[in-house]
Image (cartoon, helix red, strand yellow):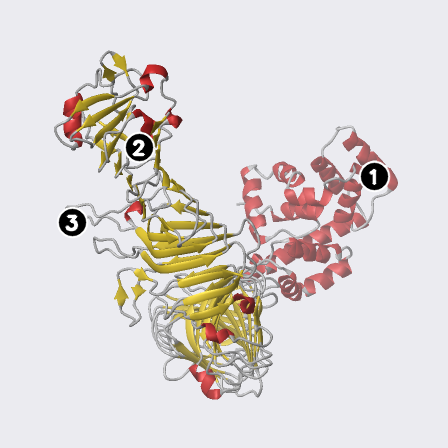
């Protein structure tokens, strides 16, 4: 094939002012050969190439022409020539490639010499780029600029001679100037010389266990260069290849399925230019590096031993890790349960210790560090860390925690040097630091996470909480100059001894809880220690709690059996007493109990009861977390006593319900109303209203109050069981108004009288019959008491109420809310007999209900279906059609009636 190199180099010089790159030259020779030696296609392609556009784009035609002159001859064009060629381009009489061809073809004299010399240089330069790094370097703006600089310097014969004499040196300079990344592949031989010298870019050398071999001499040149040694098996030698040198190699990556090093270290410390080494192994790793190296080691098996380096990160080791080096400032441990020892004898040094998924209470030791800076993240599986920190000389511990850290401090406690601990970030942290007697400063003000700490009081103790949830348990008597500020967040403070006078504990912003198991721990005199707490947890408590000594508490909480009676004085308005069952409830002996038995009385007294609308909430929460097939976890309270509070709001609910056991034939699943939270007694002196809400049921043996006039359970969907209201001797016997729940209401009237409105549900009311005290049974809608007949497709629904011990001529049945037909309908009631008091007999007697309310030709609003001399079913014609209509008209049962009711016993 004919050689068209000169013609192609002429085009490179003319258009780009540089020699052809070897690959480009070979390509375009093929194109010209295919065109029979015609370079027009090449010229046209050059005139539209990206490189051409980057040089000439956006320039006017006169500038373009002048650039051609400079490329060809090394001078500016004469004005006449510039004007001529620019005009021909402006007039579209010629294209740029035509201009280049014409100007080059017309060269003579010095111009011709300059053009020819540039082409000769270009030919020579391309020819010396015969090594891989030289040809690979010819890429990118830096390489092109350097090649143009060399070409521009050639015009005269003398400059050509100088340039040709320096071709090899220029090629080396060119490679160094190029920032193009060069990829090398090592051979099994001793690789060295220019063929393995990198350029000015970030070069990468690829090798395996066989090709990273003896006497390899690798020079990465400029840039940041890497050697990758990938051993897919486990063939990597125990030491680096003999005689191998690495120059200007900043990164080394070793991957192997086996171990790295053995009893002796895989010694890389002689490779002085290394800055970063990464090892991914399938076995134990023992490696040595220079002090300026950052070392990353990952293994799936075995121990990790390192020597040197300023930063070492490890992951996955299944045996202990040991790090030795006096330049070590950072150590990272990840995804391991193994102990780690840092040997750095530099006195008073600081260590940055990174933990990511280090578990099993692994001991991490640095016996010389003065300051430890822990940075905690998650492991590969999202797990946090659980470590025992041994730092015999450490006085400061700073923890930046973004995950979960459980810190064991037995070693720190034994050394007893740590004076300050600081917490930051949003992670979850827990530690018992009560054994570290030297610790006087705990600062979590930069933390937004959940921190749980057990602390021993010390003179001058200063504790600052963060903006997250801080839980602090204080052991020992809080010193008189100790200051605890829990900061923002919903914090939790627990203590076991009476604080000394002068101590300060501030709950800070948020809804904070103080735990006091014995009221005596509050003290009775001196300036109060505690402030800004919203909740008092008195679980397992006893004694009289002066709420003035705990700040702004409005919630009183217990979830455990009390150790004795509890009273609260100086209570705030709108306070809440809450009793919350746990997944596992315990008795006083610490044994599991089926229910949360409060076990002692609770008394609440207002600080100022002079208001007319004071309110106290009592919340009871059942919790059936077991799977016993029976109801457990109900709250069973003793007496709760209050005074001077107009409204008591009782809320009964359930958290977890018994679920169905699919392994048994029955259905054990429960609904909220199956759970009954209970009081022995509620003593509410001065109260007017008891409100009952929630989805669980309530059982109150008796309410004692001389002033209570209303029990309103309309906000409850549970069942309500109450034995009425007791008044003291001599108190006014004001009738109680009872408004029922949406469930079953079972109410017993007392000698005060009751106005009973049962609302929905199958309610029962036992009226008072020992004196002529008027009780009123009130219905406001038909659905308050109904019996829905059974059909072929549905069962009977019994939602009717039952009234016991109605006194004829004394008690009343109030139907005014039903708006029944007036006139003759209210002048009497129809009567009929039924064989028994069962509801299915009633259905069979009434049949289709036609004419049930017909009394000798007159329709009545009420009919009495009697099964005895005085007892029976009272039927109410709500729709006024004279017939009993299931699911529309109303019915209720009456037992123990003193006589047959008359119309005067009704209120219409």
Q: Name the spot of residue 134 as percent of width and height, x first.
A: 58, 60
Nearest the camera: 214 or 714?
A: 714
Q: Name the spot of residue 388 as percent of width and height, x first.
A: 42, 78
Give the class, few, some or many, for how many residues have Cα within 10 Å of label 3's Cα (few <14, many ≥20): few
Residue at x 71%, y 58% (from the top left corner) = 150
Residue at x 19%, y 48% (from the top left corner) = 662
Residue at x 47%, y 56% (from the top left corner) = 576
Residue corresponding to mark 3 = 664
Q: Secondary structure at mark 3?
A: loop
Residue corresponding to mark 1 = 82
Quarter assignment of residue 796: top left
Q: Do callouts 2 and 1 mark residues in contact (Cβ within 8 Å)?
A: no
Q: Residue furthest left?
A: 835
Left or right side of 154 for 830:
left
Q: Residue furthest top?
A: 857
Give the class, few, some or many, for how many residues have Cα within 10 Å of label 1's Cα (few <14, many ≥20): some
- Say which mark, if any, is on residue 809: 2
Image height of 755 relative to 460, above or below:
above
The mark closer to the camera, 2 or 1, is 2
The Cα–Cα distance between marks 3 and 2, rounded to whole angstroms, is: 55 Å
Image height of 706 relative to 334, above or below:
above
Q: Name the spot of residue 874 as percent of width and height, x first.
A: 25, 28
Q: Quadrant of the C terminus?
A: top left
Nearest the camera: 707 or 29?
A: 707
């Amino acid at each position: 094939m004919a050689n068209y190199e000169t013609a192609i180099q002429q085009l490179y010089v003319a258009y780009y002012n540089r020699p052809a790159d070897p690959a480009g030259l070979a390509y375009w020779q093929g194109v010209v050969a295919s065109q029979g030696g015609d370079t027009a296609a090449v010229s046209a392609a050059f005139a539209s190439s990206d490189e051409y556009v980057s040089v000439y784009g956006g320039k006017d035609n006169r500038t373009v022409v002048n650039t051609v002159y400079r490329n060809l001859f090394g001078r500016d064009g004469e004005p006449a020539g510039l004007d001529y060629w620019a005009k021909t381009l402006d007039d579209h009489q010629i294209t740029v490639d035509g201009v280049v061809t014409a100007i080059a073809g017309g060269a003579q004299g010095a111009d011709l010499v300059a053009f020819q010399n540039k082409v000769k240089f270009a030919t020579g330069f391309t020819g010396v780029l015969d090594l891989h790094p030289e040809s690979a370097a010819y890429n990118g703006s830096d390489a092109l600029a350097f090649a143009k600089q060399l070409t521009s310097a050639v015009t005269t014969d003398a400059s050509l001679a100088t340039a040709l004499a320096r071709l090899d040196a220029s090629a080396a300079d060119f490679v160094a100037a190029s920032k193009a990344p060069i990829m090398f592949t090592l051979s099994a031989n001793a690789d060295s010389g220019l063929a393995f010298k990198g350029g000015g870019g970030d070069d990468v050398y690829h090798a395996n266990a066989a090709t990273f071999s003896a006497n390899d001499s690798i020079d990465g040149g400029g840039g940041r260069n890497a050697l990758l040694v990938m051993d897919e098996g486990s063939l990597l030698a125990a030491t680096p290849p003999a005689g191998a040198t690495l120059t200007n190699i900043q990164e080394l990556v070793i991957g192997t399925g086996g171990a790295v090093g053995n009893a002796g270290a895989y010694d890389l410390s002689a490779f002085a230019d290394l800055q970063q080494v990464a090892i991914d192994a399938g076995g134990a790793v023992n490696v040595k590096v220079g002090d300026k190296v950052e070392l990353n080691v990952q293994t799936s098996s075995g121990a990790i031993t390192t020597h040197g380096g300023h930063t070492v990160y490890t992951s996955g080791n299944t045996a202990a890790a040991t790090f030795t080096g006096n330049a070590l400032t950072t150590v990272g441990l990840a995804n391991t349960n193994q102990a780690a020892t840092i040997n750095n004898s530099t006195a008073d040094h600081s260590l940055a210790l990174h933990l990511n998924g280090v578990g099993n209470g692994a001991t991490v030791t640095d016996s010389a560090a003065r300051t430890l800076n822990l940075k905690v993240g998650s492991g590969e599986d999202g797990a946090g860390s659980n470590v025992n920190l041994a730092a015999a000389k450490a006085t400061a511990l700073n923890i930046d925690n973004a995950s979960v850290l459980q810190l064991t401090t037995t070693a720190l406690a034994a050394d007893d040097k740590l004076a300050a601990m600081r917490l930051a970030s949003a992670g979850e942290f827990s530690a018992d630091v009560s054994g570290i007697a030297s610790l006087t400063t705990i600062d979590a003000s930069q933390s937004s996470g959940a921190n749980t700490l057990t602390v021993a009081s010390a003179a001058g103790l200063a504790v600052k909480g963060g903006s997250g949830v801080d839980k602090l348990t204080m052991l020992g008597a809080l010193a008189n100059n100790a200051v605890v500020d829990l900061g923002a967040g919903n914090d939790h403070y627990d203590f076991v001894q009476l604080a000394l006078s002068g101590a300060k504990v501030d709950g800070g912003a948020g809804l904070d809880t103080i735990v006091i198991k014995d009221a005596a721990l509050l003290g009775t005199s001196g300036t109060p220690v505690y402030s800004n707490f919203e909740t008092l947890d008195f679980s397992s408590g006893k004694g009289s709690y002066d709420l003035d000594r705990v700040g702004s508490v409005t919630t009183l909480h217990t979830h455990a059996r009390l150790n004795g009676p509890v009273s609260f004085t100086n209570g705030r308005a709108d306070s809440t007493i809450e009793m919350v069952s746990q997944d596992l409830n315990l008795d006083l002996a610490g044994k599991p109990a089926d229910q949360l038995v409060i076990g002692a009385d609770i008394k609440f007294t207002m600080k100022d009861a002079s208001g007319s609308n004071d309110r106290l909430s009592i919340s009871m929460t059942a919790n059936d977390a077991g799977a016993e097939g029976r109801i457990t976890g109900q709250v069973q309270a003793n007496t709760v006593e209050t005074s001077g509070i107009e409204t008591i709001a009782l809320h009964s609910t359930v958290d977890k319900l018994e679920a169905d056991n699919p392994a048994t034939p029955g259905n054990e699943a429960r609904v909220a109303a199956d759970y009954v939270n209970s009081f022995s007694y509620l003593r509410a002196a001065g109260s007017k209203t008891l409100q009952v809400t929630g989805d669980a049921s309530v059982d109150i043996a008796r309410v004692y109050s001389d002033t209570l006039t209303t029990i309103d359970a309309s906000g409850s969907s549970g069942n309500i069981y109450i034995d009425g209201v007791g008044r003291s001797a001599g108190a006014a016997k004001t009738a109680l108004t009872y408004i029922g729940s949406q469930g079953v209401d079972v109410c017993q009237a007392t000698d005060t009288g009751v106005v009973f409105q049962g609302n929905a549900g199958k309610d029962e009311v036992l009226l008072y019959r020992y004196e002529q005290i008027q009780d009123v049974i009130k219905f406001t809608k038909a659905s308050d008491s109904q019996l829905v007949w059974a059909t072929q497709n549905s069962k009977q629904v019994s939602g009717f109420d039952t009234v016991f011990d109605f006194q004829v001529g004394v008690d009343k049945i109030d139907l005014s809310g039903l708006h029944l037909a007036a006139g003759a309908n209210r002048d009497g009631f129809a009567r009929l007999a039924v064989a028994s008091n069962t509801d299915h007999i009633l259905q069979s007697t009434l049949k289709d209900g036609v004419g049930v309310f017909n009394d000798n030709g007159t329709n009545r609003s009420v009919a009495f279906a009697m099964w005895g001399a005085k007892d029976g079913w009272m039927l109410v014609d709500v729709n006024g059609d004279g017939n009993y209509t299931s699911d529309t008209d109303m019915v209720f049962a009456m037992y123990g009636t003193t006589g047959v009711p008359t119309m005067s016993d009704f209120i219409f």
